């Protein structure tokens, strides 16, 4: 492993690799340190579906990112528009107006440019047909401000970026766990200590530790969602039993190292992105399944807990604006689980993740038969819940999955405000879910130039951060697809600033 570089990037997910590529554009020599072995590379990014939210004004900008879309399909698709003002409004609304206004403005302003830059690095995109646009009367209409994804999902995105790094002379060391930062007597960060394990580098105990000197260090090692002790300490009781959707390596190393040199903790340390996740999924993500354990078609059916009761408005908003907070709600239910229930009328709308082999599913020709098979649920209460739900639906309003259709219930303790379909047509299906945590919202404070800020409000020289370990942007919830875009936008900024500073330091004053 090299022991010196202009810029060292800690992490190898989307934000980290964007930072590395951006730093390389300045002429800086770049070294990337990835704690995971090669087979598990890519951090949380590799586990995502690859969707990226960005502001755009219409069809022309979509086609600039997806130029090889067939003319026939393009003609039958309404991409709409997602102007900056709407992106900002959505971000402010779902975070209850707590998001950092300066960081939010940069995220939105630079979102389209970041995707265009990614495409220049070899990343290819596709419209998200089937999950974000349904065919109605021969046309597709996109909804919820989320339109495209990386070809191949999160793993495809990481493959594209890693290939770009290799083509630009950027070395990635795998099994290389950064353990602490080095700083000079003036407080300038000048390197990072790295433990690289035996047998090709697994980053575990027993490996040798070396100091890698650098003019700038960029931290992009994710949050602390894979650290059960930190989850319980900061998120609260019960979070130690949550499933981790992504990598097992995001244990807060980057955050801890920065705090040790005086960085300011920032953002919502008690908050996290958490979703409905298959009840029998493994404790950490499985790259062979990727994001398939998620279960996000709940707007078309109902969710019930062990008591047989509904507990959320499944149709409160588009899935993009509710799924990241419903994991916390599921975790709070008796037994930390729920069942999602659908009938034959909506089965065609269920996302592909409902058809994977590793799924916790029961079926029944009748509701009574289904109830008997829903493990842990009070069957009598469940049947009473469905009966009351069916009777409360305003069936005069037509169902339309592409818009908030206003087809709702009235008079229930928890009403459903859109997409309320009667559960009356067998066969019926039910899927058991629990809480799957994606990433944590608390982290480090950064400037608009991605410089890490200390607890006196001053920049820590030589230290930058981007991605999920940055706090202050997301609170309580987030608009779907914002995470990867956040990583790309601030990864570019961190890389450009760190690279320029490192090159200037190498050449000295003019």
Image (tube, grey):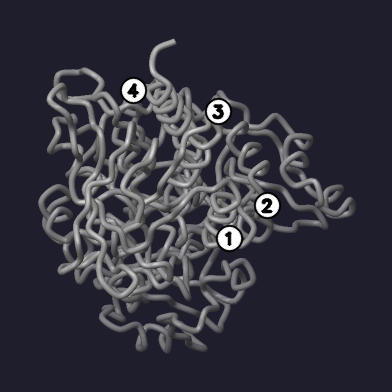
Q: Give the alpha-carbon distance from disc 2 to disc 1, as whole Å.
A: 9 Å
Q: Residue at x 22, y 26 (%)?
A: 188
* Label 2: how many Cα within 10 Å (few below 14, some 14–19, many 20+): some
Mark earlier in primary sequence (2, 4): 2
Q: Is residue 99 left or right of residue 254?
A: right
Residue 62 placement (x, y as % from top left): 73, 40
Image coordinates of residue 275 in percent, x first then y, are 37, 58
Tell me which numbered mark, 3 or 4, is placed earlier along the sequence. Answer: 3
Q: Which residue is drawn at 61% across and 53% down?
A: 150
Q: Is residue 419 visible?
A: no
Alpha-carbon span between mark 2 and mark 4: 30 Å
* Image quarter (top left, top right, bottom left or bottom right) of the C terminus: top left
- Gap between marks 2 and 3 measured at Cα: 19 Å
Q: Give x and y (percent) for residue 135.
A: 74, 58
Q: Mark 3 points at which residue?
A: 110
Between 482 and 507, the residue placed more toward the observer is 507
Q: In which quarter of the image is residue 86?
A: top right
Instruction: Identify the residue position indicated by label 2 in the image.
Output: 124
Find out whether the residues at labels 1 and 3 contact each other: C-beta distance under 8 Å: no
Among numbered discs 2 and 3, the one appearing first in the sequence: 3
> Which one is nearer the viewer's eye here, 242 or 67?
67
**Quadrant assignment for the N terminus:** bottom left
Crowdedness of circle 1 by 10 Å Cα count: few (<14), some, many (20+)? many
Residue 156 circle label: 1
Secondary element at tag 4: loop
Q: Is residue 425 left or right of residue 490?
A: right
Mark 2 touches mark 1? (CB < 8 Å): yes
For mark 4, what is the residue?
Answer: 447
């Amino acid at each position: 492993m090299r022991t010196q570089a202009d810029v060292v990037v800690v992490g190898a997910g989307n934000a980290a690799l964007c930072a590395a590529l951006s730093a390389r554009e300045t002429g800086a020599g770049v070294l990337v340190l990835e704690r995971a072995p090669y087979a598990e590379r890519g951090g949380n990014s590799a586990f995502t579906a690859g969707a990226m939210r960005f502001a755009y004004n219409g069809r022309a900008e979509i086609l600039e990112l997806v130029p090889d879309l067939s003319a026939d399909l393009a003609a039958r698709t309404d991409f709409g528009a997602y102007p900056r003002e709407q992106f900002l409004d959505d971000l402010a609304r779902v975070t209850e107006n707590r998001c950092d206004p300066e960081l939010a403005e940069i995220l939105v302003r630079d979102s389209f440019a970041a995707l265009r830059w990614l495409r220049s690095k070899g990343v290819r995109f596709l419209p998200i047909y089937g999950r974000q646009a349904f065919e109605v009367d021969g046309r597709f209409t996109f909804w919820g401000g989320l339109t495209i994804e990386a070809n191949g999902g999160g793993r495809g995105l990481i493959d594209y970026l890693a290939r770009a790094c290799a083509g630009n002379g950027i070395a990635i060391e795998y099994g290389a766990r950064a353990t602490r930062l080095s700083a000079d007597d003036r407080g300038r960060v000048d390197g990072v200590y790295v433990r690289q394990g035996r047998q090709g580098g697994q980053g575990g105990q027993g490996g040798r530790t070396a100091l890698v000197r650098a003019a700038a260090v960029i931290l992009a090692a994710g949050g602390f969602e894979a650290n059960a002790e930190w989850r319980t300490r900061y998120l609260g009781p019960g979070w130690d039993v949550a499933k981790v959707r992504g990598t097992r390596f995001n244990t807060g190393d980057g955050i801890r190292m920065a705090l040790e040199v005086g960085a300011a903790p920032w953002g919502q340390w008690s908050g996290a992105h958490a979703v409905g996740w298959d009840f029998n999924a493994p404790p950490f993500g499985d790259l062979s399944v990727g994001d398939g354990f998620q279960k996000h078609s709940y707007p078309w059916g109902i969710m019930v807990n062990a008591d047989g009761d509904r507990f959320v408005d499944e149709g409160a908003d588009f899935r993009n604006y509710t799924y990241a907070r419903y994991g916390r709600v599921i975790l709070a239910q008796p037994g930390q689980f729920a069942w999602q229930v659908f009938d034959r009328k909506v089965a065609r709308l269920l996302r592909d993740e409902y058809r994977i082999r590793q799924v916790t599913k029961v079926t029944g020709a009748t509701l009574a038969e289904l109830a008997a098979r829903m493990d842990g649920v009070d069957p009598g209460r469940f049947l009473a819940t469905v009966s009351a739900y069916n009777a409360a639906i305003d069936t005069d309003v037509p169902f339309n999955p592409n818009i908030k259709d206003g087809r709702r219930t009235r008079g229930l303790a928890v009403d459903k405000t859109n997409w309320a379909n009667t559960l009356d047509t067998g066969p019926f299906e039910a899927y058991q879910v629990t809480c799957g945590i994606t990433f944590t919202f608390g982290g480090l404070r950064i400037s608009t130039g991605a410089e890490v800020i200390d607890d006196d409000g001053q920049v820590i020289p030589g230290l930058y951060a981007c991605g999920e370990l940055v706090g202050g942007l997301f609170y309580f919830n987030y608009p779907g697809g914002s995470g990867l875009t956040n990583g790309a936008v601030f990864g570019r900024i961190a890389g450009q600033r760190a690279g320029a500073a490192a090159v200037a330091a190498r050449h000295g004053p003019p």
